């Protein structure tokens, strides 16, 4: 499980976002110094007026093949660490998130 938790209506995903990157992308699961497993994500958008958060939502929506309205920022609006809820069929979403486990540092 690591970076996400299954819920009745989807999954709750732990993310560490790097804004202002040279490209948008998901870099797999990283374990932080505190032992928390997170999805490492980067976006070109800068953290101005929520632009980086919107870019992260679009990136996750594309990756999980859901609409942007199915991806919601639960916590961490102004922090690098974020909690994201992705609505959908939990088993299908979990399979996508499990593929990141092989990319763990």
Image: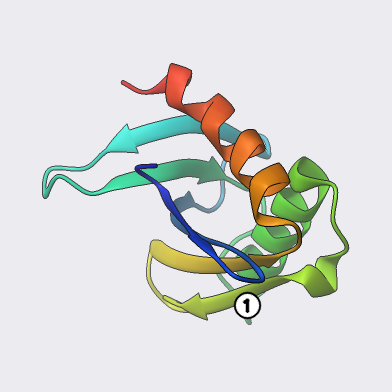
The N terminus sits in image quarter: top left
Return the x and y of residue 14 as percentages of the image width and height. 42, 57
On the question of residue 80 being in view, the answer is yes
Query: In percent of the image, x 60 and y 70: which residue is there?
Result: 8
Q: Front-most of 36 and 43?
A: 36
Number of callouts? 1
Q: Residues within 10 Å of mark 1 (few under 14, many from 20)?
A: few
Return the x and y of residue 97 as percentages of the image width and height. 57, 39
What residue is shown with label 1?
A: 50
Return the x and y of residue 60 as percentages of the image width and height. 70, 51
The C terminus sits in image quarter: top left
On the question of residue 22 being in view, the answer is no
Query: In percent of the image, x 63 and y 77: which residue is there?
Result: 50
Task: Please give left or right for residue 30 compared with residue 97 in the image.
Answer: left
The colour scheme used here is rainbow
Above or below residue 50? Residue 56 is above
SS for dot 1: loop
Above or below residue 16? Residue 81 is below
Task: Please give left or right for residue 2 compared with residue 84 in the image.
Answer: left
Residue 68, quarter of the rendered image: bottom right
Return the x and y of residue 9 as percentages of the image width and height. 67, 71
Q: Front-most of 26 and 95?
A: 95
Residue 63, quarter of the rendered image: top right
Task: Please give left or right for residue 55 compared with residue 16 in the image.
Answer: right
Q: Front-most of 17 and 101?
A: 101
Query: In percent of the image, x 34 and y 43: which residue is there?
Result: 2
């Amino acid at each position: 499980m690591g970076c996400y938790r299954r819920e009745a209506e989807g999954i709750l995903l732990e993310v560490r976002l790097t804004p202002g990157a040279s490209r948008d992308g998901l870099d797999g699961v990283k374990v932080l110094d505190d032992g928390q497993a997170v999805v490492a994500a980067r976006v070109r958008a800068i953290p101005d007026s929520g632009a980086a958060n919107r870019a992260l939502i679009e990136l996750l929506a594309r990756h999980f093949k859901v609409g942007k309205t199915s991806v919601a920022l639960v916590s961490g609006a102004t922090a690098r660490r974020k909690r994201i809820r992705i609505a959908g069929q939990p088993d299908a979403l979990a399979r996508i998130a499990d593929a990141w486990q092989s990319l763990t540092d």
